Amino acid sequence: NYQPVYNVKTGAASGAEALMRWQLPDGSWVRPDLFIAAAEAENMIVPLTQLLIEMVIEDAQHWTLPPGFRLAINVAADHIQHPDFVTDIRQLAAGLAAHQPNLTLELTERSLLSDGEDVIQKLQLLRREGIHIAIDDFGTGHCSLSYLQTFPLDYLKIDRGFVNAIESIDGETPVLDAIIMLSHKLKLKIVAEGVETPVQLQYLKDRGVVFIQGYLYACP
Ligand code: C2E
Ligand code: CA
Ligand code: CA
């Protein structure tokens, strides 16, 4: 599945995030958070993501995308440590080349925990090739804030838990406000996740958040 991301400045979709799905033979669906966690535990997340990359390239054969359209995929922590990581991402970029894609990798805070130097080098390499890096579920991990200065980042995705806390236009959401201010200071672009109500959208717009993802604009 793909979930569009809305740009409040242009009033149009600026990109989409690929979200993996698994349907059982009986037609029922397995929840992604369950099968992704299981794949991680069983050392299957790398081959699964390689399959996802093939499927995205296949899907893209049927697409016409506006210039600058940004496609994001989720990358698991184990994958970044894997020797195939850079090759896999280059394969995706090459497979989408006809669209001149803007690719974004969504990493969780956990990805940045181990072997920092090696990860920094791989990310810097890919960034030089035009790939952007986003921190997913920001604020829910156990990382120190110091990686915001150390790692080469482009986007910060505010976890929907913080967006959920917005109840009125003039309500108090001190942690969310602090994250938004921090992102502005660090010149990181912000994507707000899980935006479900017009009030949440307005609140985020008022604070200069440009990218909005959630059921209000589009479901995956
Ligand atoms: P995520 O990366 O934070 O993806 C966003 C999740 O929020 C998606 O759940 C999406 O369907 C859901 N969502 C979007 N808008 C709203 C909203 O307005 N309200 C609510 N309540 N939910 C919203 P999904 O697809 O079930 O995926 C869950 C998680 O599974 C993802 O969270 C991600 O961590 C993981 N995942 C999904 N696909 C992949 C993948 O291809 N690779 C990896 N490594 N992880 C994946
Ligand atoms: Ca994500
Ligand atoms: Ca997220």
Image (spheres, rainbow, N blue to C red):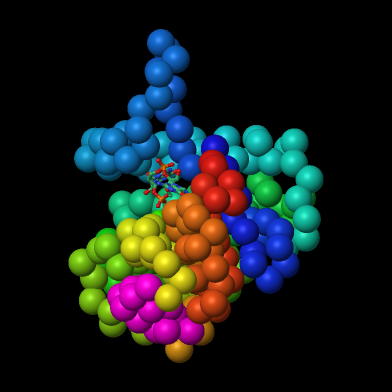
Which quarter shows the C terminus?
top right
Is residue 178 one of those drawn in magenta?
Answer: yes
Count of numbered badges drawn on the protein: 0
Is residue 81 one of those drawn in magenta?
Answer: no
> Which residue, as the protein is rendered here, is positioned at the far top?
26
Residue at the spot 68% in from the left edge and 49% down from the top edge? 96
Question: Height in image: 84 above or below 130?
Answer: above
- Of residues 205 and 133, which is closer to you in this image? 205
Residue at the spot 54% in from the left edge and 77% down from the top edge? 206
- Of residues 159 and 60, which is closer to you in this image? 159
175 relative to 103 in the view: left or right? left
| Spot occupied by residue 133 in the image (x, y as percentages of width and height) | 49, 67
Question: Height in image: 189 above or below 73?
Answer: below
Question: Height in image: 185 above or below 88?
Answer: below
| Spot occupied by residue 56 in the image (x, y as percentages of width and height) | 59, 40
| Spot occupied by residue 105 in the image (x, y as percentages of width and height) | 49, 59
Which quarter shows the N terminus?
top right
Which quadrant of the structure image shows residue 93? bottom right
60 relative to 219 in the view: left or right? right
Residue at the spot 63% in from the left edge and 41% down from the top edge? 57
Residue at the spot 48% in from the left edge and 63% down from the top edge? 200
Which quadrant of the structure image shows residue 59? top right
78 relative to 168 in the view: left or right? left
Query: Main structural element of the magenta stretch: helix, strand or loop?
Result: helix
Highlighted magenta segment, given as a residue range: 171-184
- Of residues 60 and 7, which is closer to you in this image? 7
| Spot occupied by residue 73 in the image (x, y as percentages of width and height) | 50, 51
Q: Does residue 193 appear in this view?
A: yes
Which quadrant of the structure image shows residue 111? bottom left
Location of ligand 3 given as a quarter of the image: bottom left
Q: Does residue 126 appear in this view?
A: no
